[in-house]
Amino acid sequence: MNQAKVPVDGNKEPQICVIELGGTIGDIEGMPFVEAFRQFQFKARRENFCNIHVSLVPQLEATGEQKTKPTQNSVRALRGLGLSPDLIVCRSSTPIEMAVKEKISMFCHVNPEQVICIHDVSSTYRVPVLLEEQGIVKHFKERLHLPIRDSSSNLLFKWRNMAERYERLQKTCSIALVGKYTKLRDCYASVFKALEHSALAINHKLNLMYIDSIDLEAITEAEDPVRYHEAWQKLCKADGILVPGGFGVRGTVGKLQAISWARTKKIPFLGVCLGMQLAVIEFARNCLNLKDADSTEFRPDTPIPLVIDMPEHNPGDLGGTMRLGLRRTVFKTENSVLRKLYGGVPFIEERHRHRYEVNPNMINEFEENDLKFVGQDVDGERMEIIELANHPYFVGVQFHPEFTSRPMKPSPPYLGLLLAATGNLNAYLQQGCRLSPRFSILPPSGRPRRLVVLFSDFPISIVRKGRRRSPLPPQKKKPRPPPARGPKETSASTGLVTRGEKEQQEIIENIDEVQNEIDRLNEQASEEILKVEQKYNRLRQPFFQKRSELIAKIPNFWVTTFVNHPQISTLLGEEDEEALHYLIGVEVTEFEDIIKSGYKIDFHFDENPYFENKVISREFHLNESGDPSSTSTEIKWKFGKDLTKRSSQKQNKASRKRKHEEPDSFFTWFKDNSDAGADDLGEVIKDDIWQNPLQYYLVPDMDDEEEGEGEEDNDDDEEEEGLEDVDEEGDEDEGEEDEDDDEGEEGEEDEGEDD
């Protein structure tokens, strides 16, 4: 219990400790742990202990019948050992029928609400949505007496949007992972998830190509030429290259060749832990002419020890000698890509796991030749981050950023790799490092609205008069030549066969130079477009003002607009609607500095029986650390009229159509500035409603139509389910997977060495 109270994020004491007991109930290997659980439930007391039993419900392929007997037997065995399940989670390949659920409830002695059915879904991001729809949050809240706030529901809005968006991704980004444990891909589970989080953030599917580093070496070319050339073809067609951590000397030659390919061909590259160390070695050998530069891990007697063991590392004893855990890294300069990706903060804290480090006595020559050590530890003795100047993205980090990546808050180094691989890094940095992917989606009325596309083939597109016009045509990916085949002259730097293709290679290099000029012009065009957007923001203001004056003459315009909006309506209770009848005006003011992406929303109210305020505002901006934050007006409620304290508000008809719970009051949006979904709602108002409120005011009341016609098609209800895609600001760690330090590349130490 004491260990469960230790803070894991430097913030505060955890509220919940999750303990997983794997295996099968009744196995002798798990009996000591089951007995420990049995005793622990009395020590922790029932109100602090919740037992969840996960069971498979198999389905016969021949008949399609779902069998409950395995679940009944496992629950009976669990009870015989002194544990009774509070929840039974049933896994199945297809949705479990209600009759099957009721049968499990009856024979396992639990209420039907305590049987949670989880069938195979299109993505793992759908699982939390499926759990929430079956009331698991409500059960935890009541069973463990958890103070779950309304903002948690907004987080589920956000998660649901992300899950839906994941299934609609069209574009693909290919990343080559060059490692030595690729046969067991779970070794890189954290790396894969970090890449997937980043790809989702920029609206791309991830195509991760695993390449065994030894397949890139000359020894494989001699033994298995087909496998050698297939590996090089994968590397050549990759949009970005990642070299993760690892142990031992095997496969390092292939990793060095992959790093050289990324550096010379200007392909976005990220090196993690050993990957960073090898990037420094490759640069020393091929750019500084230090041919004997090496790591003492691979070659203890190297004449140029570029990577050395740390003072606290005892080579004679590998146990407990690693530099582990969360450590602080301080940025040396403001002119760092990675610092900008982290939001311009002076320091970061990331998790480490290594025994070796770059020799601090040899860094001066590297920095004189454009390989910058932009991050160091707090004492300035350990090199933590490298960046190569005049390269789209060539970054190495000594820490493991994948361990802190989350679906709605991707790791900045991995995000930078994906942004660079898709050609969007410069646009992202110019926008102030704000994750705000927006889509050209027509509203229900069919009218186009103004949207800014940050992550497409070009940074900004503008919708005008029903047409989507791009300022520049989409830029296609630069073709990369496959490794040469046939009779044979091998390049020392890449291992590719080049004889007979010299002329073609020169042409490709010339094309690459021309393409670089095109890229430079595209970046310049992006800057000019931002200036134009600023100009037209100012020009639109008089028309917005005139429109507001006209709207003020229409009674109940804004409350009608909000009730008709498919997203806002789900947040409105009956008393919210009554209060919004006194809303006489809405104004959105975007800050002059578009780079900060800040704006303010003002709600103007007439004299009303609910609160004293004439104007209620919410302002969104970036804080000093570069993270999105917001401030709002304190509502001065009249006595007994605080709608945010009325948990018994009845949901309106639109919200009753939904299966999941919604926040009790629209006005809670102004109450909690840490609200996970606040920015989502703000973006909906700013980018959708404010741009053309008339389209929602004129939408007919669907509830009235249903009452008049008596029966209505359910298609509209289905269209209302879920939010449209809005900004994804990932600041929450709730409901997100965490990765253990001891996974992946840490699983193989058979060679007795570490990075």
Image: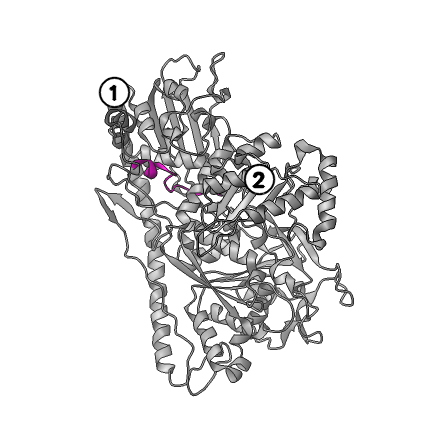
Q: Is residue 622 visible?
A: no
Instruction: Name the residue: 48% across, 82% down.
Output: 225
Query: Residue 682 location in percent, x, y?
Result: 40, 34
In the picture, the disc for residue 107 is: 2
Image quadrant containing the C terminus: bottom right
> How packed is label 2: few (under 14 Cα within 10 Å), some, or many (20 or more)?
some
Instruction: Name the residue: 71% across, 46% down.
Output: 34
Mark 1 residue element: loop
Relative horizontal placement of residue 661, taking residue 400 as reference (left or right): left
Quick one: 110 or 466, which is closer to the camera?
110
Relative horizontal placement of residue 126, taking residue 3 as reference (left or right): left
Image quadrant containing the N terminus: top right
Query: Residue 273 location in percent, x, y?
Result: 60, 61
Q: Earlier in the sequence, mark 1 or mark 2?
A: 2
Q: Amino acid at mark 1?
A: Ile
Residue range corresponding to the magenta coloring: 716-730
Compared to 215, does 695 lie above or below? above
Query: Residue placed farthest to the bottom in the image?
Result: 487
Quick one: 266 or 719, which is closer to the camera?
719
> How packed is label 1: few (under 14 Cα within 10 Å), some, or many (20 or more)?
few
Disc 1/disc 2 C-alpha distance (Å): 61 Å
**Residue on which the image places disc 1:** 554
